[in-house]
Amino acid sequence: MAVKKDRIFYYDFLRAFAIIAVIICHVDFYFGPVALPTEEILRTTFHDIGRIGVPIFLMISGALLLNRDYPSLGDFLKRRFARIIYPFIFWMILITLTNFYFHKPYSYMWNVFIGNPSIMWYFWTLIGIYLAIPLINVFIREYGEKGCKYFLAIWFIFLILNTFNLYPLFPYFKLDYFAGFIGYPVLGYYLSTKQFKYSNRKMWIIGLIILIVSLAVFVYADRTYGFSTLTLMYQNIIIAFMGIGMYVLIEYLDKENKFNSIKNNFIGKAISSISLCSYGMFFSHVIVIMFMSKINPHSTLLFPLMFIATIFLSWLLPYIFSKIPYIQKVSGA
């Protein structure tokens, strides 16, 4: 798991944040009994921050994969699928063995495999996105920034309609061609390549404002209307703006060299290592949480310790596997 010298730090920062955010969504049961309204708001806010993780992952994929000159379609699919399928198989074996250990029924394990209910839905979503990337790539290379704006404009219309449960307005007026998760990679590519007229400082401040406002709106809506009506599998305009705010904030903080003081010290190396292990951590944290739940003290006071331990152990597993010959290629690191 060698760290390349030419890595772009804000990608590593965002990827490390994204996997921690994903873990956030699955550990709020570590909290103790919530009695006060302020405690409930704190817990809801903490959980809703986790909703930024998946959009960030997909936006980074778009920034790295779009507008590229690939030797062949077969070469692209072979390389991308090898990077996600082999680790998926490896970790699914470990997760299945863990489920056997906890005496889960076979029907439950099948549902875990297909992503219902489990985090494996993201793997199958990623498969669909990788199948679409070559098509979107040709579109972006042909039409450039105008093509991005055209695609994103229709995608945002779809998100707005979906958020307010207005889609489709008419039975035969559908935007499925632009809908769904594929908009996030296009958005990530656009934000990474667009030359905005504002300074780096103004851009990260704008990103911070977008992040705070959209998160506050989402927390309010979550508490008022209920989480189940808001998620829509991330096809939600508020979550999209949360992703935009976080992405722009970190990108332009890096461009203004705000991270120079940490890039080469322990913090920077930890961020890079978590980034490199993030795909393995996506799977390993399922195993870690299953075991950690057995020692869960259900204490708000001890929650930070439980949270940090979960992140550390989720990183440690793929990190160790990445050092073992033959297994390293399927470790997700």
Image (tube, grey):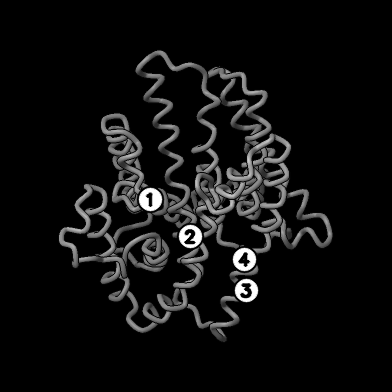
Vertical placement of residue 107 versus 298, above or below: below
Residue 280 in the image, given as x and y percentages of width and height = 65, 52
Residue 133 coordinates in the image, percent (x, y)? 46, 73
Amino acid on which the number 1 mark rests in the picture? Tyr
Question: Which amino acid is tagged 2?
Answer: Thr
Q: Which residue is mark 3?
A: 79
Quadrant of the rendered image containing residue 36: top left
Query: Residue 234 got which mark?
Result: 1
Q: Which mark is residue 125?
A: 2
Task: Give the alpha-carbon distance from disc 3 to disc 4, as whole Å.
Answer: 20 Å
Neighbour class for label 4 at 10 Å: few (<14), some, many (≥20)? few
Instruction: State yes or no: discs 4 and 1 in contact (Cβ < 8 Å).
Output: no
Q: Quadrant of residue 296?
A: top right
Secondary-structure class at tag 1:
helix
Residue at horizontal 42 percent and vertical 64 percent from the top: 185
Q: Mark 4 sits on what residue? A: 6
